[in-house]
Image (cartoon, grey):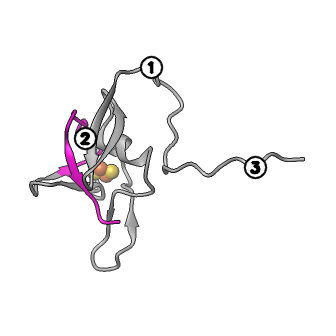
Amino acid sequence: MTQAHPKPAGLWVRLSEKQREPLTFFLNGEPCQALVGDTIMTALLTQSRGLRRADPSDAVRAGFCVMGACQDCWVATEEGARLRSCLTLIEPGMRLVMAP
Ligand code: FES
């Protein structure tokens, strides 16, 4: 008999370095937890299925290269700044917005 595993909330599952210090950031105004040293990409994809919506298809995008080359991982701050999430560390209190 196989045991069913619950579907993780995020696209990525954190397997190691779980002991790093936690921090709080905000996504669409809601507080979220990440770990010090996470990139924005890691912080978001461990708790959501994508980073942004593609224009004009509206498809969910989650990055591709994870090394700063593909330009598929841009996210926005509440102030309107655009950040490449695979190269930018999440910071305590950072306020990000993402289309649902
Ligand atoms: S995932 Fe390719 S630039 Fe960030």
Residue 30 is situated, as x and y percent measured from the top left of the image, at: 30, 50
Near mark 3 (Cα within 10 A), the count class, few <14, some 14-19 or many ≥20, is: few
Distance, label 3 to label 2, CA atoms, is 35 Å
| Mark closest to the chain's N terminus, 3 or 2 | 3
- The relative height of residue 87 versus residue 61 in the rendered view (above or below) is above
| Mark closest to the chain's N terminus, 1 or 2 | 1
Q: Mark number for residue 19?
A: 1
Question: Given the image, on which type of amino acid does mark 2 rest?
Answer: Leu
Per the image, the residue denoted by label 3 is 4
Location of residue 41 (image quadrant): top left
**Regarding mark 3 in the picture, which secondary structure is present there?**
loop
Magenta part of the chain: 83-100
Q: Which residue is farthest front?
A: 30
Which residue lies at the image location 26% right of the left edge and 56% below the top edge?
Answer: 28
Q: Are marks 3 and 1 in contact (CB under 8 Å)?
A: no
Residue 64 is situated, as x and y percent measured from the top left of the image, at: 38, 54
Which residue lies at the image location 9% right of the left edge and 54% below the top edge?
Answer: 79
